Amino acid sequence: MTIQDFYDYCLSKKGVTEHFPFDEDTLVFKVGGKMFALSSLSQWEKNEPSVNLKCDPERALELRAEYDSINPGYHMSKVHWNTIDVNGDVPQKLLLELISHSYELVFNSLTKKVQAEILQKDN
């Protein structure tokens, strides 16, 4: 996966916006004002990319046990976030599924009103 693939896939989701709330290096994707994916641009440039994604706590533990390149979220809640080394042992198809899973967790946590506004905007 390239940074462009990651960027395009995240932005293809309904209501997604991009931000740099922490510094000029950390790209953050949000839906409804809440983060669902973040990544260091400089790590991509060094060919050591990783992404932080929200994950169901039970599934997060299962994924960490199965894949060496999935670890507790770096600088995030270790219960709800994973850091995934993009060049590791995680197949790209699974990485895309995990991005979608993170998006859905955050989208589903939004109020019904905000969800409806997002869905209406993109129609």
Image (spheres, helix red, strand yellow):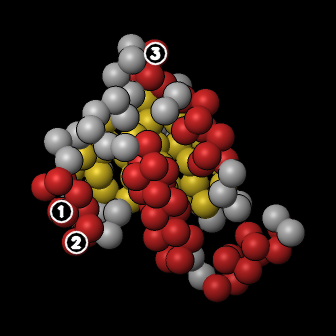
Is label 2 in contact with label 1 (beta carbons under 8 Å)?
yes
The CA distance from mark 3 to mark 2 is 32 Å
Mark 3, residues whose alpha carbon is within 10 Å: few (<14), some, or many (≥20)?
A: few
Image quadrant containing the C terminus: bottom right
Residue at the far bottom in the pictured view: 112
Q: Position of residue 22 (x, y in %)?
A: 47, 37
Q: Amino acid at mark 3?
A: Glu
Residue underneath mark 1: 61
Q: Amino acid at mark 2?
A: Glu
Residue 108 appears in the figure: yes
The CA distance from mark 3 to mark 1 is 29 Å
Q: Position of residue 40 (x, y in %)?
A: 43, 29
The CA distance from mark 2 to mark 1 is 5 Å
Residue at the far top in the pictured view: 46
Q: Position of residue 27 (x, y in %)?
A: 52, 36
Figure disc tally? 3
N-terminal-most mark, 3 or 2: 3
Q: Is residue 60 left or right of residue 103?
A: left
Q: Position of residue 46 (x, y in %)?
A: 39, 14
Q: Residue at x 40, y 52 (%)?
A: 94
- Residue 58 circle label: 2
Q: Amino acid at mark 1?
A: Leu
- Residue 104 circle label: none
Q: Quadrant of residue 42?
A: top left
- Residue 45 circle label: 3
Mark 2, residues whose alpha carbon is within 10 Å: few (<14), some, or many (≥20)?
A: few
State whether residue 64 is above or below residue 59: above
Determine whether the residue tagged by mark 3 lies in a helix, strand or loop: helix
Determine whether the residue tagged by mark 1 lies in a helix, strand or loop: helix
State whether residue 32 is above or below residue 93: below
